[in-house]
Image (cartoon, helix red, strand yellow):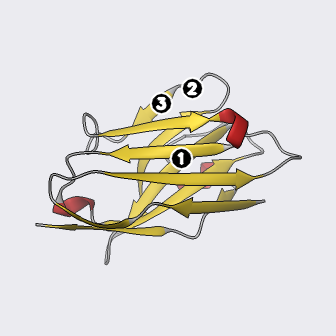
Amino acid sequence: VQLQASGGGLVQAGGSLRLSCAASTRMYSIYVMGWFRQAPGNEREFVAAISWSRGNTYLADSVKGRFTISRDSARNTVYLQMNKLKSDDTAVYYCAADLSSGSGDITTSRRYDYWGQGTLVTVSS
């Protein structure tokens, strides 16, 4: 199973970016896919997640009203639309997938089995 994230880059504050993450899996069902981020010197933190069957979404308080998570089930792809970006959003963004448990806290790293390589988002002020 591989997760391929893309879409990061350099953007000015107030701008937008859309991250994508495609999961290459044919044998396993996806329960949840999520996005985490890690800024230099900080721990990895939860950003957003989406349940695959129902499409329920979960967002960290820091990004509510600015970020949106969505999925394309046919393509096994999750998206993170990021609007009104701030300098505090600068980080490496990681996508993650829960392919086995279907249970546990959706906002914690241990819920997820597989991780993408990360894509850097830099917001200039």
Q: In this view, does 30 lie above or below 5?
A: above
Is residue 6 left or right of 91 when viewed as pictured? right
Q: Is residue 54 above or below residue 118?
A: above
Q: What kind of residue is marked 2?
A: Gly
Q: What kind of residue is marked 1?
A: Gly
Residue 44 appears anywhere in the view: no
Quadrant location of the N terminus?
bottom right
Q: Position of residue 109 (x, y in %)?
A: 55, 55
Mark 1, secondary structure of its residue: strand
- Neighbor class of circle 3 (other Cα within 10 Å; few <14, some 14-19, many 20+) is some
CA gap between label 2 and label 3 equals 6 Å
Label 1–label 3 contact, CB within 8 A: no
Marking on residue 70: none
Is residue 24 left or right of 17 when viewed as pictured? right
Q: State the residue at coordinates (27%, 51%).
A: 16
Mark 3, secondary structure of its residue: strand
Q: State the residue at coordinates (53%, 25%).
A: 56
**Residue, far bottom:** 41
User: Residue under circle 3?
Assistant: 57
- Neighbor class of circle 2 (other Cα within 10 Å; few <14, some 14-19, many 20+) is some
Q: Where is residue 92 in the image (x, y as percent from the top left)?
A: 41, 68
User: Residue under circle 2?
Assistant: 55
User: Residue under circle 1?
Assistant: 34
CA gap between label 1 and label 3 equals 9 Å
Q: Position of residue 27 (x, y in %)?
A: 89, 46
Q: Which of marks 2 and 1 is nearer the N terminus?
A: 1
CA gap between label 2 and label 1 equals 12 Å
Label 2–label 3 contact, CB within 8 A: yes
Q: In this view, does 74 lie above or below 86?
A: above
Can you tell which quarter of the image residue 110 is in?
bottom right
**Residue, far top:** 54
Is residue 109 left or right of 11 when viewed as pictured? right
